[in-house]
Image (cartoon, helix red, strand yellow):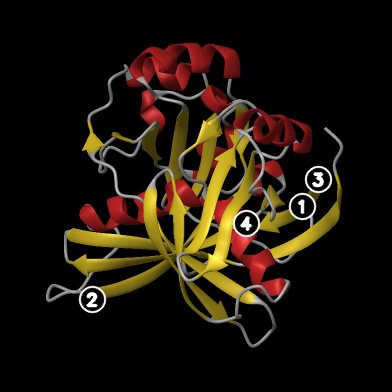
């Protein structure tokens, strides 16, 4: 089985978030895809079941332990590889079909070479936290005093999103993965996403970390599927300003720095002030390794 290893949201091998990509997975069953993902050992591996073609590209995603509906960095990695191999043009619109639904994808050709993939992220409702925040934070070495009280704690899909005041507090966190997974599981949660508006670089809007023990990932280096919702959240609460009459804004989210694997996710949010309608994530990637896997 031919497998490519691609680092997404970076141009530097070893940085960003690593994904496995299998371009010819049409004949693979679920058990085989799960074994391959476990053997690859990346936080996610993407499998191309169909395309590219008139209907776009059909993907399935697996962590080392389970299948998931959508993965941002593995999608960026896949479309990077398809463009690099000449299976898709370096620029233009296409479509992604996955368990999360049909999502628009755009490839943007870059002057420096390669492409940036822009992907519309799935929309999920924003809900109150079903678990006591003090309990959750205790399992990552945090306290409620570290939380940014000017922004709300919210659940989005299977993640709990918690705003922090200071970047140094975000960096100091260390998760007790087993205990955190046990606490979150009864509530249908898989992970804890923490972020702060205190960034490392000018032009960035947030700095984040994501602990996902419920999917067998102690910490995900750079998470596109969470960055899109974060852009929507920041626009909803005025931390990212949309025009009153409607329009689009772009920003950057930092992640992976605390792990020594820095990545940068471009986020584009469309809508009007306080009422975002759609988010896209944008990212580059670099192919690190290609070879045969025997499973």
Residue at 69%, 53% (x, y): give it: 24
Q: Nearer the viewer, mark 1 or mark 3?
A: 3
**Is residue 186 at least partly visible in the picture?**
yes
Secondary structure beneath disc 4?
A: strand
* Element class at badge 1: strand
Instruction: Quote the CA–CA distance across marks 3 and 2.
Output: 45 Å
Q: Would residue 163 be found to the left or right of residue 5 on screen?
A: left
Q: Which quadrant of the structure image shows residue 111? A: bottom right
Q: Position of residue 226 (x, y in %)?
A: 44, 46
Mark 3 Cα within 10 Å, few/some/many (few <14, many 20+)? Answer: few
Q: Is the residue 109 above or below the residue 205 in the image?
A: below
Which mark is on residue 1? 3
Q: Residue at x 50, y 52 (%)?
A: 224
Question: Disc 1 marks which residue?
Answer: 5
Are discs 2 and 1 less than 8 Å apart at CB? no
Q: Earlier in the sequence, mark 4 or mark 2?
A: 2
Residue picked out by circle 2: 247
Labels 4 and 2 touching (C-beta < 8 A): no
Q: CA distance from mark 2 to mark 1?
A: 37 Å
Residue 197: percent from left, percent from top: 41, 52
Rounded to the nearest whole Å, what is the CA distance between mark 4 and mark 2?
27 Å
Q: How many marks?
A: 4
Residue corresponding to mark 4: 263
């Amino acid at each position: 089985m031919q497998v490519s290893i691609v680092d997404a949201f970076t141009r530097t091998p070893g940085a960003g978030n690593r994904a496995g990509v299998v371009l010819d997975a049409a004949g693979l069953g679920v058990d085989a895809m799960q074994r391959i993902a476990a053997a690859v050992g990346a936080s996610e591996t993407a499998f191309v079941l169909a395309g590219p073609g008139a209907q776009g590209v059909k993907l399935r995603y697996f962590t080392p332990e389970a299948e998931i509906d959508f993965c941002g960095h593995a999608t960026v990695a896949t479309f990077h590889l398809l463009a690099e191999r000449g299976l898709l043009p370096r620029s233009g619109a296409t479509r992604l079909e996955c368990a999360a639904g049909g999502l628009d994808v755009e490839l943007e050709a870059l002057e420096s070479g390669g492409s940036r993939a822009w992907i519309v992220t799935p929309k999920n409702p924003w809900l109150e936290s079903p678990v006591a925040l003090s309990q959750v934070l205790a399992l990552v070495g945090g306290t409620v005093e570290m939380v940014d009280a000017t922004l709300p704690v919210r659940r989005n899909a299977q993640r709990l999103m918690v705003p922090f005041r200071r970047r140094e507090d975000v960096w100091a966190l260390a998760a007790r993965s087993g205990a955190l997974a046990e606490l979150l599981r009864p509530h249908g949660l898989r992970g804890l996403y923490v972020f702060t508006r205190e960034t490392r670089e000018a032009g960035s809007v947030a700095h984040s970390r994501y602990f996902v023990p419920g999917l067998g990932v102690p910490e995900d280096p750079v998470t596109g599927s969470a960055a899109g919702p974060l852009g929507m959240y920041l626009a909803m609460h005025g931390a990212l300003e949309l025009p009153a009459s409607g329009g689009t804004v772009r920003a950057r989210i930092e992640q992976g720095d605390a792990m020594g694997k820095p990545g940068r996710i471009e986020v584009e949010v469309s809508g009007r002030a306080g009422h975002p309608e759609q988010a896209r994530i944008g990212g580059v990637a670099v192919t690190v390794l290609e070879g045969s896997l025997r499973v």
